[in-house]
Amino acid sequence: MAKALAGCGGPLAEWRHHRGVTHSLWFGPLVGPAVALHTGETLHATWPDRFPISDNLGRLVAAGKPGLLTWGAGGPEVDPEVRDLFVVGDRPSTEEQVRERALAALAEEPVEVLLKERRRRLRAVGPTVPADGAGTVEADADADR
């Protein structure tokens, strides 16, 4: 992940996988798998379409593993026990694909939040007439989510 995000600049360029799990780009490595899983489950309960639960993270926590890596003489490496726990597909993503997905998610999230807030406010005041006079603007039913 760190290699894929190296060209992004800002805090993403400085991100390095430390201990823990990358379930949460910012908090997983800082708090460990159990807290990351709990946070993910809490977010999923509120926004299931935006925060899926990681089955691999659940397996990591159930196994009592403190993170993904072990530290050997050559530096950090994926813990072989963790490698055996994880279920992965047969087509790994390229660095470019990981970068594109991460950047798309970072770009879409604030826009979605702003649009939902706008819909919530529109719902509070009722239908309004746009400046061009063409029709009305109404809020979506999911504005409070």
Image (spheres, grey):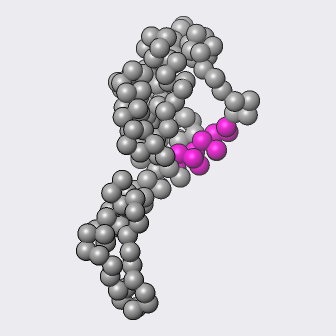
- Image quadrant occupied by the N terminus: top right
Residue at 39% from the left image edge and 38% from the top image edge: 45
Does the stretch in magenta take in 42?
A: no
Looking at the picture, how far across and down is residue 35, in whole percent? Answer: 36, 24
The residue sitting at the bottom extreme is: 133
Q: Which of 51/5 is in front? A: 51
The residue located at (52%, 18%) in the rendering is 59
Do we see residue 75 in this rendering?
Answer: no
Closest to the observer, 101 or 43:
43
**Residue 49, above or below 39:** below
Point out residue 145 in the picture as x, y percentages from the top left corner.
36, 53
Pick out the residue farthest to the top.
73
Up/down of 83 relative to 41, above or below: above
Residue furthest to the right in view is 90
Q: Quadrant of residue 38?
A: top left
Q: What residue is shown at x 50% (from left), y 49% (from top)?
A: 105
Judge from the rendering whether residue 27 lies leftward or rightward of residue 65; answer left or right.
left
Q: Residue 136 is drawn in which quadrant?
A: bottom left
Magenta part, dominant SS: helix
Residue range highlighted in magenta? 93-103
How many numbered badges does the structure rendering display?
0
Residue at the image point whose x is 50% and y is 17% from the top? 60
Of residues 89 and 129, the one nearer the viewer is: 129
Describe residue 145's horizontal placement relative to residue 8 as left or right. Answer: left
The answer to whether residue 56 shows anywhere in this view is yes
Q: Is residue 83 left or right of residue 39?
A: right
The spot of residue 81 in percent (x, y) is 58, 10
Q: Looking at the image, is 91 positioned above or below residue 128? A: above
Is 94 magenta? The answer is yes
